[in-house]
Amino acid sequence: MSFSIYDQKPWLSEYKHDQSTNIEIQHNTVLEAFKEVLQAHPTTTILQYFDYAVSVQEFDEWTSALAKTLVAQGIKKHDRIGLYVQNNPVFVIALLAAWKTGAVIVPINPMNKVKELGYVLNNSGAKALICLDELYQEVVEPLLATEEVPTSLFLTCSSLDGQTQNNEILFAGQKRLQVPEGVLDVQEIIANAASINATLPALLPLSLSSQDTALLTYTSGTTGKPKGAMNTHGNIVFDAFAFTHWADLSVRDVNLATAPMFHITGMVAHAVVALITGCKLVLMHRFHPNVALEIIRTHKPTFTAGAITAYISLMNTGDIKPGDFDSFKTIISGGAPVSPTANADFYELTGKYIHNGYGLTETSSLALAVPIGKKAPVDAASSALSIGVPVQNTTARILDEEGKAVAIGEVGELAIKGPQVMKGYWQQLEATAETFVDGFLLTGDVGFMDEKGWFYLVDRKKDMINAGGYKVWPREVEDVMYTHPAIREVAVVGVPDGYRGETVKAVVSLKNGVSVTAEELIDYGRENMSSYKYPRIVEFMDELPKTNTGKILRRSVR
């Protein structure tokens, strides 16, 4: 692919595609694109979940039945619907069903605990929640018993729905739970789709525009509290088509859902790409390397996207055999930095090159990527592997502290402008204004661009910890750890980790006369936070370093 320097200013670190490489999107929404898939490929399998295969026609009928049920229960255009499941068929079914009603999906990390879920439901004003039965029992019921939330409609599903293989690694001892009184069963709605579609009124034609919000995707920000990024229909339909053009995907491809779909990369690269192309989307509830290998051998995927930790764990099984990865055309990694060594090891073992990609929740996933057929260069000074070049219709800049473009090779903050960039943060005008400069989104990541237009990351402007692709805000972890009765002060930092890239470390000072072990504090964090957030390392200090005003110096702690 060819690139040109923007505005003919070769001393500025700013690149974008030549106009000849841009793509023109014919659809305002995913619904419009899916309608074409339905007309052209009704009998094609669009979802594969172990031995559970769903055709495009069945998928359309099921999503219509769920959409009509939601409308009958009072869901209206622009209402928010929480989606609190793993990589299960219901995730994709609920996604399109919600959009058929004009509602906004709020994807929720299934690792979230009671307080985390409560925050998202309250902040988003979610009117409905679709969740796994086990999460309803373990998290939702305790939440409803202790806190008021705006959510009044609940629907549950089981990870065992549809499929009968019940893989022992993922589902050992698991059973379907009884649906609580007043809660709707998604599987029952699907089973009765024909009668629901026949008896409930047809949905009114929606006049959804590209500027209507499709997703309210929560991401941590500078305040430490998660913010809802408003990803529009135009944002996600563009980024999904960017993926398909970049990786040359079509209805003939098999898309392995390695990345979690509640995360923006899995949402777009897996769920939305399948909806706009009709390619087979292969799901496995949650990623496990041994299960993934079984599925790769059975279903012969041609494309996947995931964090580098997933590919490292596949290598660490010691079970990859010659030919296992031959079906793949394209493998993309995003969410966490990829080391040149890990990429080289994977290539030696599988014969497949991992193409680096870069994006944020705020960019609806893909913003920069390594062109297919090329290998990313390595910066000699920092040994960083390039994150690629801007994808189609997208411009990337390196800015100084005053918001001006720096010279080629100089370090600054990466900023992005393109049709995939969110329209703003939910109910946070000030935070939205602070995030944009001259129409460019400030990423908070620090890097540089070389003379050939390749971009590299060297550090992060913010204190955010990137643990295996999951972003962790230190203050959020600190706030939880401070609830332990033995802790006097705590500072949370990211430290290098060979597997996760970074992991969470808590440096703690204790109250006088109190004793507690590091293992006890780690257990406390595990019980009260998502698995990627809790401190994996605890170190004790008599006094944490502070400023003259008493503020803990996290940088000194690090």
Image: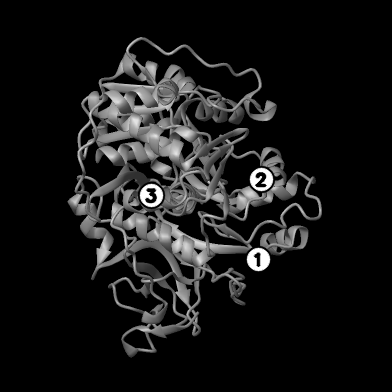
Position of 103 with respect to 302 (left or right) is: left
Which percent across, then down, holds residue 333? 56, 57
Q: What's the residue type where badge 1 is placed?
A: Pro
Q: What's the residue type where badge 2 is placed?
A: His
Judged from the image, the secondary structure of the residue bearing numbered disc 1 is helix
Q: Is residue 6 visible?
A: yes
User: What is the C-alpha distance between the residues marked 1 and 3?
Assistant: 38 Å
Judged from the image, the secondary structure of the residue bearing numbered disc 2 is helix
Q: Which of marks 1 and 2 is nearer the N terminus?
A: 2
Q: Residues within 10 Å of mark 1 (few under 14, many from 20)?
A: some
Image quarter for residue 216? Answer: top left
Q: Residues within 10 Å of mark 3 (few under 14, many from 20)?
A: many
Q: Residues within 10 Å of mark 2 (few under 14, many from 20)?
A: some
Residue that numbered label 2 is attached to: 299
Relative to 505, does residue 247 appear above or below in the rendering? below
Q: Can residue 553 be seen in this view?
A: no
Residue that numbered label 3 is attached to: 34
User: What is the C-alpha distance between the residues marked 3 and 2?
Assistant: 23 Å
Q: Which of 329 and 321 is in front in this view?
A: 329
